[in-house]
Image (tube, rainbow, N blue to C red):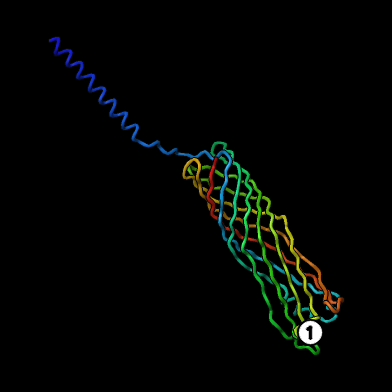
Amino acid sequence: MKKIAIMTSALFALCRFTSAGTAFDKNLQQPEPTPAYHDWSGFYLGAFAGYKYSVVDHDLTLGGTFNQIPFVKNPLESRGSGDLDFSGAELGGLAGFNYQIRQWVIGLEAAGGYLWARDSSNTGAFIIPEPNVPPLEVRTSAKTHYLVTVAPRIGVALGHFLPYVTGGMAIGDLDFSQSIHDVDDPTARIIGEKTRTNVGWMVGGGLQYAFNQHWSARAQYQYIDLGHADFDGSVTNSPDFRSHHDASLTEHNASFALIYQF
């Protein structure tokens, strides 16, 4: 009887050890569960690519001796004013910091990119049906090369998603040129150009998704107003014929970014 009791106790202990070992092995094999939420607090860096649609609203105003010949002034001002609408790609980088308070995420971000955005127009030679008025031509061009934004943002953490809004400072350049040509006399023309870096503003919003604690991706839209650039001109061989040329730049920017959070 004593031997049977010892054998029963040993068998019971072996079963308990085997059961515990099997449970331990299962725990080792199971991956750690993905957290139901993401902690957005911390510094981050990223790179982005985007599509930019730019609108340059340009205006030509003639003065001086042009005021005495409205039949020339009015058609020229009409053909020298209008919009240059163009689009292009953008590539750049970003850096920022987020601080999360419960579901609210508050941050500050700086981003900078290079743009491929430019356009030009040419009226071609046109004739004003008045005596002694030569064929005239108006040429206009605009381009922008870079954009920098610095802005706070605020969002709501919804699990691994972060919808947010943003708005702040925008810095960009506008290269604007315009010329008026007397087709019959190459020496009679108005030529001018203005390149200016402007400080403007932007507003926008986006949606960011965290794959894990470090990597996330986002899509974003921005509306940007970069102010204007202007210059004065006059006919090269008749300076009493004066002109004022003005252009303003606004942009619609859609981008996709890949971000690493420290």
Where residue 175 appears, x then y in whole percent? 71, 65
Residue drawn where x is 71% and y is 69% of the image: 58
| Residue 242 image-quadrant placement | bottom right
Q: Nearer the viewer, residue 120 or 222?
A: 120
Where residue 111 appears, x then y in whole percent? 62, 51
- Depicted 12 relative to depicted 229: above or below: above
Q: Nearer the viewer, residue 177 or 159?
A: 177
Residue drawn where x is 69% and y is 81% of the image: 124
Q: Badge 1: how crowded within 10 Å, few (<14), some, or many (20+)?
A: few
Most distant residue in the top direction:
2
Image quadrant where one finds the N terminus? top left
| Residue 86 image-quadrant placement | bottom right
Most distant residue in the left direction:
1
Amino acid type of the residue that numbered disc 1 sits on in the rendered structure: Asp
Residue position for label 1: 185
Residue drawn where x is 17% and y is 16% of the image: 8
- Depicted 69 relative to depicted 45: above or below: below
Residue 29 is left or right of residue 131, and the answer is: left
